[in-house]
């Protein structure tokens, strides 16, 4: 490698982190070259034809590409990307959180969902969340020790390395370790979010690491997290034991309990990821694979598309089509609220809910020109569910062999519970807010809840995260997004447009305007751009209440691999700061 190329790569790395350089393919390549050299890696001779990576941050995408350059497969790359995101997007994901990894192994066409969802601690009690008068304690599920569930992401990274990857964790975690120790220059997105949560970070447990002398840092500030780097190294050296046992585990339990929680050492040592059969179904000649419970996403996607299969659809954005999509979502979210929860704790009639007979019977009440009032579908009994935060992240990867990963990971609300146990650098989640406290207490995202998703020791809260694969004659689309309950509608809209269009335009799919309906409240939310006055009038004329959101939502990451020649392409949502490489 020429010295000039190396120096150019490092210059771009600085510029990219500051956000002052456009992310052209040439410059993306240079930053990966610099990353490879900095980790002491030599570039392999084998080409990466047909590989692609899309993530919510350019440095995380570069980490994934570097691991592929090193000879790793898509599963190795997903470890590198998820770990890097844990460093550069602490407001959205991290070692203190969890998520779902949807995998496809090309050699034997195995498809599996690695469930790394967080679990409630064994010592949890409802008295932690209500006062003596039975009133919910403000903030108990969103900040401090009572908000934190047992993390699953570290176990997932180890599981992927041991069962699916080709490279050791010392290699796949190296980019994240470097970013944590040497630091990275925060972008404008980080600066804005830190400003929004400045007082929260000042009052948290060791969360001042994310600030600059007690203030939200400006774009370009170098954020160093040496303690997080040390924890990543422990995982690289000792696997699960590096996080779930020993000094890191002791620090986690001590900090959470000092902050009002009820963790036990056994909660960490007994945590397990679960391999689950994904939801898989056919729609108009395509095979769709998506996350299974405790994600509601796959079931809702299956129900929505089965509902729409009986209609002639136009493009998303045409009122006649959008009316039908809204009605499909209305019914899917009604069933989400009635039935769905952790399948290890609640008997969920999945086979019935995704059967064509059931869905079509439910769809019989749809009128082409008139909205169905949500109350007409029935009341939500106790046993309904809630949805998680919008502050999540997603990555999509395919390698030259055709192995692929769609993974959505989260710590829930921005900067999680606000607890960083001393010496670990691990920002803990506030996923306890994803459980239902009581049927009459909707969460911050206005989703009604009930007791199927109530808090129970070692239970996993219901989620809307929807990593998915869509396969048809063109090839395979790998996608997902953050956005809380809006994740499901994002994936649905992108799937419909992908299958409708003869050609694949990923940039358009991830950028297209979005709308959402979730049964209750009975309204159609739309992004502030992209829907004309005529469209709103047409939908209102059908009886839909239209509410324009104050900002755009989601941060979709998509990869496509063609069946004709195996070429790959990728796209990152323009709503975020991510970068796609292919």
Image (cartoon, grey):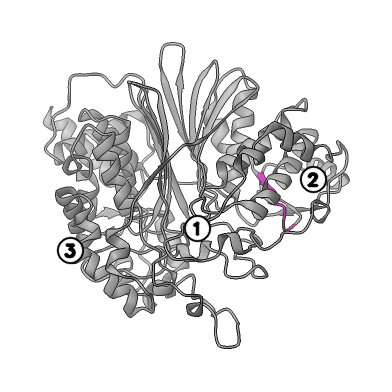
Residue 102: give x, y in percent of width and height. 43, 37
Taking the image as shown, residue 135 lies to the left or right of residue 165, namely: right
Give the alpha-carbon distance from disc 2 to disc 1, as whole Å: 35 Å
For disc 3, the neighbor class at 10 Å (few under 14, some 14 to 19, many from 20) is: few
Could you tell me if residue 353 is visible in this image?
yes
Out of 63 and 283, give the one closest to the viewer.
283
The residue positioned 55% from the left and 54% from the top of the image is 346
Residue 268 x %, y %: 30, 61
- SS assignment for the magenta stretch, majority: loop
Looking at the picture, tell me which residue is in the foreground, 94 or 571.
Answer: 94
What residue is disc 3 on?
A: 246
Q: Secondary structure at mark 2?
A: helix
| Image: 272 above or below 9 | below
Q: Residues within 10 Å of mark 2 (few under 14, many from 20)?
A: some
Residue bearing the label numbered 2: 536
Q: Position of residue 419 (x, y in %)?
A: 35, 70
In which quadrant is the C terminus drawn? top left
Asked if the residue under mark 1 is in contact with the one under mark 3, i.e. CB atoms within 8 Å, the reply is no
Q: Is residue 144 visible?
A: no
Residue at numbered disc 1: 461
x then y, percent, for residue 367: 86, 38
Dot 1 alpha-carbon crowd within 10 angstroms: few under 14, some 14 to 19, many 20 or more: many
């Amino acid at each position: 490698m020429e010295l000039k190329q190396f120096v150019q790569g490092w210059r771009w790395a600085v510029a990219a982190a500051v956000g002052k350089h456009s992310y052209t393919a040439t410059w993306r390549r240079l930053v990966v070259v610099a990353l490879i050299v900095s980790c002491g890696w030599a570039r392999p001779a084998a080409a990466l034809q047909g590989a692609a990576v899309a993530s919510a941050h350019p440095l995380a995408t570069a980490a994934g590409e570097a691991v592929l350059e090193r000879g790793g497969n898509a599963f190795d790359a997903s470890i590198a990307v998820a770990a890097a995101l844990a460093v550069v997007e602490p407001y959205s994901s991290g070692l203190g959180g969890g998520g779902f990894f949807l995998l496809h192994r090309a050699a034997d066409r195995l498809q599996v969902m690695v469930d790394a969802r967080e679990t409630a601690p064994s010592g949890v009690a409802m008295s932690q969340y209500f006062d003596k008068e039975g009133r919910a304690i403000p903030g108990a599920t969103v900040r401090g020790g009572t908000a934190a569930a047992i993390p699953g992401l570290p176990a997932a990274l180890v599981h992927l390395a041991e069962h699916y990857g080709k490279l050791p964790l010392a290699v796949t975690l190296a980019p994240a370790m470097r970013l944590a120790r040497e630091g990275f220059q925060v972008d404008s997105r980080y600066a804005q979010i830190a400003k929004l949560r400045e007082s929260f970070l000042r009052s948290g447990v060791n969360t001042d690491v994310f600030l600059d002398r007690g203030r939200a840092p400006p774009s370009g500030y170098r954020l160093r997290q040496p303690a997080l780097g040390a924890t990543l190294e422990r995982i690289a050296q000792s696997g699960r034991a590096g996080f779930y046992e020993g000094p890191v585990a002791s620090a986690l339990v001590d900090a959470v309990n000092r902050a009002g929680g009820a963790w036990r050492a056994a909660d960490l040592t007994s945590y397990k990821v679960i391999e689950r059969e994904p939801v898989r179904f056919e729609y108009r000649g395509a095979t769709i694979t998506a996350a299974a419970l405790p994600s509601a996403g796959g079931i809702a996607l299956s129900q929505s598309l089965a509902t729409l299969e009986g209609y002639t659809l136009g493009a998303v954005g045409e009122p006649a089509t959008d009316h039908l999509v809204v009605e499909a979502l209305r019914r899917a979210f009604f069933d989400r609220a009635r039935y769905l929860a952790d399948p290890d704790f609640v008997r969920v009639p999945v086979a019935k809910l995704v059967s064509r007979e059931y869905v079509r019977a439910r769809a019989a009440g749809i009128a082409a020109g008139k909205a169905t009032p949500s109350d007409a579908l029935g009341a939500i009994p106790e046993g309904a569910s809630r949805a998680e935060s919008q502050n999540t992240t997603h990555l999509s990867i395919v390698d030259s062999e055709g192995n692929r990963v769609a993974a959505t990971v989260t710590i829930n609300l921005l900067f999680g519970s606000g607890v960083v146990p001393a010496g670990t650098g691990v920002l803990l989640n506030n996923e306890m807010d994803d459980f239902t406290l009581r049927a009459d207490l909707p969460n911050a995202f206005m989703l009604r809840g009930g007791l199927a998703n109530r808090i129970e020791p070692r239970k996993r809260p219901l989620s809307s995260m929807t990593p998915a694969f869509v396969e048809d004659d063109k090839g395979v689309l790998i996608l997902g997004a953050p956005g809380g309950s809006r994740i499901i509608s994002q994936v649905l809209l992108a799937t419909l447009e992908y299958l409708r269009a003869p050609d694949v335009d990923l940039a358009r799919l991830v950028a297209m305007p979005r709308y959402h309906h979730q049964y209750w409240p009975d309204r159609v939310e739309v992004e502030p751009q992209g829907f004309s006055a005529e469209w709103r009038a047409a939908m209102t004329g059908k009886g839909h209440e239209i509410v324009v959101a104050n900002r755009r939502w989601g941060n979709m990451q998509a990869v496509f691999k063609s069946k004709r020649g195996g070429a790959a392409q990728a796209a990152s949502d323009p709503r975020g700061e991510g970068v796609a490489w292919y």
